[in-house]
Amino acid sequence: MDQKQKRISAAGLLITIGIVYGDIGTSPLYVMKSIVTGNGGIANVNRELILGAISLIFWTVTLLTTVKYVMIALRATNRGEGGIFALYALVRKRAKWLVMPALIGGAALLADGTLTPAVTVTTSIEGLKNMRFGSSIPVPSQNAVVLITIIILLALFSIQMLGTSSIGKAFGPIMLVWFTFLGLVGINNMTHDWSILQALNPVWAIKILFSPANKAGIFILGSIFLATTGAEALYSDVGHVGRGNIHGSWPYVFACLALNYLGQGVWILQNPNFKTSGGTELNPFFEAVPANLRLFSIILATIAAIIASQALITGSFTLVSEASGLKFLPRMNIHYPTTTHGQIYIPAVNKMICLATIAIVLFFRTSQHMEAAYGLSITVTMLMTTLLLFEYLGAKKQPFVLRLLFLVVFGFIEGMFLISSLTKFMHGGYVTVLIAGFIGIIMFIWYFGNKVRDKHEGVSTYVRLDEYTDMLTDLSHDEDYPIYATNLVYMAPVKYNKFIKREILYSILDKRPKRARAYWFVTVNITNEPFTARYAVNTYGTKNVINVQLFLGFKKQTSVNIYLRQIVHDLIKDGTIESQPQEYTTTPGRMVGDFSFVLVNDVVSPLTRLKGFEKWMLKARVWLQNLSPNPASWFGLEYTDTVVERVPLILGKPQHNLHIRRVAAQDYSHSKDQES
């Protein structure tokens, strides 16, 4: 996997440009616009402000995106996968408290993913507003902008099932044209004033924070931060394209972005009295483009905005997949459209992000209102990532002084951005905070609910399967009980080839003895190879009790029913288990009997003696479990004889006052103790 991460190819570079840089690549659409608006409009802008703002943008992207993410974070991958959850998986053994920054940062990043598609597509479509084509104006109002934006977003989310490789191949050439266009437009404007290159001096960045020319003061950083919001998505998408392809493509992308910001700065300085027509908002990006290329730039920007949304969507798929593996979220159905393990599609997540994004478009309506909310949650994610990277560098035995320097420098920078972004809270930032809070609560409940259950279950929750094989064999041949099924299959993990949860045997032996010819205990193991299809069996010296370990590649369908029928044929053929001849069948010579699959779900028993917070967490966790997708669909058992059994979960010390005392029988009709 590590060699694949380092490998660079022309196709890989193109795909990387297509799916990784969309978010950060569309920032020129709204960053300078936000800075000018925040300073009171173009009439209140002077050279000092523009040089300082561009300097802040350049050094912010250099430090946060290039140094922190491209140079440092991309080395912190877990089997090739990146993102805050992959980073947490690498450092979680160093301290228990690290789970909190992972939960907070992951929730904030997922919330930000709902706003990015809305703001980028809306901004680009607004470029068409009131533009005349002959005698008609196709986009005459903001209502038309909203409608077109929603149609585009629906189309984008509908193609996610094709997979990021297919999408990347289609988007790659377009984004290459986009970045080249950004650079050329920037250079074209810079030819009118090459002195704009002074902005690359970091002194301008520091001076503008305290200059009277900057009417927003330190809060200008809220607009500056918009230039680097795609850095976290870049880290999350490394599993889709590989580290080497990001290292190889980022210098060109960064150069094009820097040139465009410099070019916009020149245009603003040369047009201090510019006024828009038709009441539209000033956007320096579109105004800096030559008039004969304006329509082309709007069309290209719209396509780039769609692709920008793609980076956040694919990153969200990766995050949710990793969260499920870390038990932050319930297990979800994951599809693998290609043979590359990192490229995934999660239908449920796609639908949820789609609905949230469209709701945001309808709520905010204009890009200016969306920009006011944009970036707040991602600053939280970046701070949490910095904390985890500090621990990662410790795990890699880096000197403490260097680790502390990393923490102080990036913690200070991101802390300043967070403070400046908090001003956005009442202007719409609360929306992403609420979304992040909702996601965070779900992850908190699922993770700590599992911890409560594991803490109180103890060793007694698991029993040795091999100690019950005689009992199961006897039940299998006990004709006093009717046959429940020829093959009774429990989808239940068997740990270390012998330990199984007591509730599984409780279901077979205690609820009502279930007699079967063969008892199957099946564990499904998903491998990192695409087409693995292997199995191993352990019968513990019997012909009736079979522990099956299925090893399936991530591209193989988890059709347990089909695989199990083949396994039964194999085991009957070599004499491992008894044959199952069928007297009544439409298939002559059929030697495999019927199957009944049992899935066991926990329910909190009234006898559970947990109190307060722990009991609430456990109940909330079980409630989320019942809301999760039907496990039968995950195992490919939708059309089989499947039973979902609810088994009481009794945790905590038993209550000792539940015993009842027997007394002599008498006439209680007039007893004072009798309830009316």
Image (cartoon, rainbow, N blue to C red):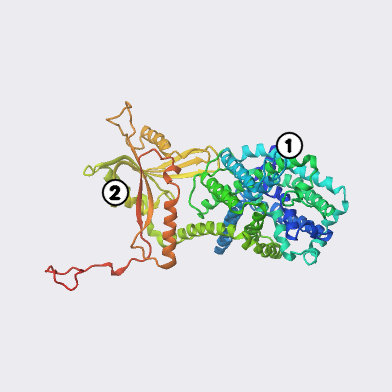
Location of residue 411 by image quarter: bottom right
Within the image, what quadrant is residue 399 found in?
bottom right
Q: Nearer the viewer, mark 1 or mark 2?
A: 1
Which residue extends farthest left?
667
137 left or right, relative to 635: right
Quadrant (top left, top right, bottom left, bottom right) of the N terminus = top right
Q: Label 2: which residue?
A: 471
Q: Position of residue 18 (x, y in %)?
A: 68, 42
**Which residue is drawn at the image coordinates 87% and 49% (left, top)?**
192
Q: Give the position of the C terminus as an image quadrant.
A: bottom left
Q: Secondary structure at mark 1?
A: loop
Please provide percent x and percent y for residue 51.
Answer: 82, 58
Q: Is 551 placed left or right of 384 in the picture?
A: left
- Residue type of the residue flagged with mark 2: Met
> Where residue 378 sits in the image (x, y, percent)?
64, 57
| The image quarter in which residue 209 lies | bottom right
What mark, if any, has residue 134 been given in the picture? 1
Q: Where residue 368 is drawn, which disc sits there?
A: none
Q: Is residue 91 above or below residue 162?
A: below
Q: Residues within 10 Å of mark 1 (few under 14, many from 20)?
A: few
Report the side of 626 relative to 391 (left or right): left
Element assignment for label 2: helix
- Disc 1 residue type? Gly
Q: Residue 641 versus residue 491: which sits nearer the camera? A: 641
Which comes sooner in the sequence, label 1 or label 2?
1
